[in-house]
Image: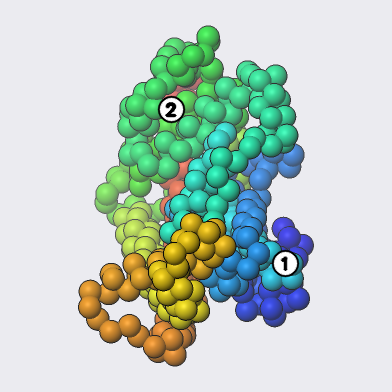
Amino acid sequence: MADRHSYDQKPEKTHDGEWVSSYMCSPETAAEEFELSKRLYYQITGRSQPPRRDIIMYRVIQSFKPGEVSPEEANRIGYELAMRFTGGRHQFVVSTHVDKAHIHTHIEFNSTNLDCNGKFANHKNSYLILRQLNDDLCRAHGLSVIENPKTSTKERKQKEMEAVRHRRSHKERLRQSIERVLSDCRDYDDFLAKMRAEGYEIKEGKLLSFRAPGWDRFTRSNRLGDGYTREALRERSAYRGGRSSVAKSPVPNAGRNVNMLIDIQAKMAAGKGAGYEHWAKIFNLKEAAKTLNFLIENGLTDYDELTARTEQAAVRFDEVSHRIKQLEGRMAEVAQLKAHIINYSKTREIYAAYKKSRHKKEFLAEHGAEIARHEAAKKAFDTLGGKPIPKVAQLSEQYAMLLNKKQEQYTQYKEIRQEMIAYRTAKQNVDKILDLSLKGQAQNREQKTDR
């Protein structure tokens, strides 16, 4: 991953880094920041993939017709494409290369989302969505696109392999649907309802099973991996909805003053009874110790106080993220208007000649790209509502000011993000420890009853 970022940001390819931009990360440390998010993802969710299946990031290459776009505009279009494709939920770096006859942009985006609690859902035909977004953006900027692209040999081979791996494709499709639905559900019942809305038939017997339209058989969720059993999905859907699994099995005295330190220390110092063994198998003792240290260092003994601080950290994170997105949006508007002004000036004479020409069809065939950029600029000026068109120098100053504000906010963003994840992880661990304590006690009671 570090090698990939290093290559994409090579000074000789990006004009000494001038044509490199990023979202929610610093280009120089993007690989390290991507890696950190994956460690946090494992701490928060406990889920991992074997190396051969683990996707650490995605790469998109966007190429332009020679002579049709400036490096600045290409980088801005690449940034906008990445933002639309990821929905602003994943870190990314956009590096525009100018060392070839055709300007092209490399986009690297993190597979782990900003909250570090989910992964990018790369659906079977994601490339078609990406292609459509790209074409729409290029047309909006007056650039040419490939009309009626042919199916490549690689695409045909992929389809043939998918047909051979038919049963596995069912599992992958189900896994992706579950991940997509889990990202926006309140609880387990809401999760099931949303899966039904996706078209899945659900069977809840001893095991949870799903069947999509056209499938001959049901697919058991536990065959998708450890994170897809009914119990795991209950916990994950409750957590995604802003609640922990404790909501299903309340902690004694939850909502009142509960000394978590005493409860956790007692659990860690417990004897080797059946309840302890059950708990120790499920929850890592080292992780419990880390959580205990975090609570002590932050003076947290009350469960309600931990909950309040976790919520406050999330609110602060959302606020600074929103401010950065606003600055990013305004920067994109300023940069686009600046590009339109430059394009308008460069293509004014060609457009005037086109309007006077008696052979417009031939003229358009030769200068179609310049004419399209000129008309796109005119449309942009119309949206100003009669206001005077600003000077390029003014827009450059405004962009620099916005960039400085963004950099200030990003420094704060990194600190608040770490704080939010630390509190969220601690609360999730406390919920799990105390909830599993109750389960262990229930098991002991059942064993005594059996005797």
Question: Residue 423: where, in percent of width, then height?
Answer: 45, 59
> Residue at 59% of width from left, 55% of height from top?
110
Q: Which residue is mark 1?
A: 101
Question: Disc 1 on helix, strand or loop?
Answer: loop
Question: Residue 97: where, in percent of width, then height?
Answer: 68, 68
- 399 lies above or below 165: below
Tell me, yes or no, whether the two marked residues, 2 and 1, touch with CB atoms within 8 Å. Answer: no
Circle 1: residue type: Ala
> Residue at 71% of width from left, 25% of height from top?
161
| Quadrant of image for the N terminus | bottom right
Q: Left or right: where does residue 120 sit relative to residue 84?
A: right
Determine the CA span between mark 2 and mark 1: 70 Å
| Label located before the other in sequence (2 or 1) | 1
Q: Left or right: where does residue 274 sit relative to residue 99?
A: left
Question: Mark 2 against mark 1, which lies toward the viewer?
Answer: 1
Circle 2: residue type: Ala
The residue nearer to you, when weighing 305 against 327, is 327
Residue at the extreme left: 386
Question: Residue 148: where, in percent of width, then height?
Answer: 56, 40
Question: Disc 2 on helix, strand or loop?
Answer: helix
- 308 lies above or below 403: above
The residue nearer to you, when weighing 240 against 75, is 75
Q: Which residue is mark 2?
A: 442
Q: Quadrant of residue 100?
A: bottom right
The residue nearer to you, when weighing 174 against 43, is 174
Mark 2 surroundings: few (<14), some (14-19) or many (≥20) residues within 10 A: few
On the question of residue 429 being in view, the answer is no
Question: Residue 201: where, in percent of width, then height?
Answer: 41, 17
> Residue at 69% of width from left, 24% of height from top?
160
On the question of residue 284 being in view, the answer is yes
